[in-house]
Image: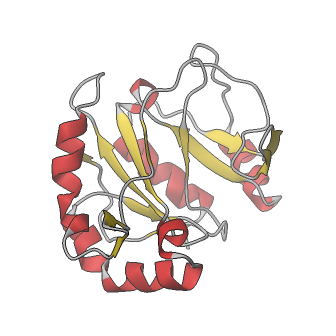
Amino acid sequence: MSSVAETLALWRSLVKNPRFLIVYGEKFASGYSDKGLGYAIDVDNLPTFTDEELARAVESGKSIAIPTGRLSDNIVDIEFDPCETLGSEIAAKKWLAENLSRLESLQTIVLRSPRFGFHVLARSRSDSLDLSAVTDWLLILAEDSPRIDGELAIRPDVIHFNGSPRPHYVILPSDGNGREYLTKCRSVRTI
């Protein structure tokens, strides 16, 4: 489990001038999502939170996040949700346990989400994302992966990079929010 202070220190060591966000949850057309920020922002108007505000938010049950793309040194968030394709959290948890060495071999930070999905974080070499580089790098996850109707069951559900006008963001592990750093790696690989 990561404390707020540890998470902030880690990301400050990885990203020049990181901007942290507080995730309050919010109502969308599709329903309530605890992943919603709960306030309007755009890429030209990111709020600034103090460490004390971030810690208080986590103490009250909220999460903290960091934007992706140009706002954070070209951070890329590659999101997988094996719970959906494998059919249950139990199956997703089993797949993660059996394939942790594959995730380790990506040599980058991998975050587990509460339902045993995971986020592979990378850094793009430029302001534009080379999807072929991402695909080639992630081929290791496809080796011997289960298939459903001939399709790989473990594949990226979405790749977040730059969002306009609203940035995408990655919710970070902090004090029991159901997220954790899955691998020992604490650096973000450039692809």
Position of residue 117 measured from the top left corner of the image (x, y, whole percent): 50, 66
Position of residue 103 measured from the top left corner of the image (x, y, whole percent): 28, 69
Q: Nearer the viewer, residue 84 or 10?
A: 84
Q: Residue at x 22, y 32 (%)?
A: 130
Position of residue 178 measured from the top left corner of the image (x, y, whole percent): 63, 70
Q: Residue at x 18, y 52 (%)?
A: 137
Residue furthest to the top in view is: 44
Position of residue 81 measured from the top left corner of the image (x, y, whole percent): 49, 62
The answer to whether one can see residue 191 in this image is no
Compared to residue 149, the image places residue 167 above or below, namely above
Query: 60 left or right of 135?
Result: right
Q: Nearer the viewer, residue 25 or 183?
A: 25
Query: 14 left or right of 124?
Result: right
Compared to residue 33, the image places residue 93 above or below, namely below
Figure coloring: secondary structure
Q: Quadrant of residue 77?
A: top left
Query: 184 left or right of 116?
Result: left
Q: Quadrant of residue 45?
A: top right
Q: Tally the marks.
A: 0
Q: Quadrant of the C terminus?
A: top left
The answer to whether one can see residue 42 in this image is yes
Q: Residue at x 63, y 23 (%)?
A: 46
Q: Quadrant of the N terminus?
A: bottom right
Q: Residue at x 51, y 60 (%)?
A: 6
Q: Nearer the viewer, residue 94 or 145?
A: 145
Compared to residue 147, the image places residue 53 above or below, namely above
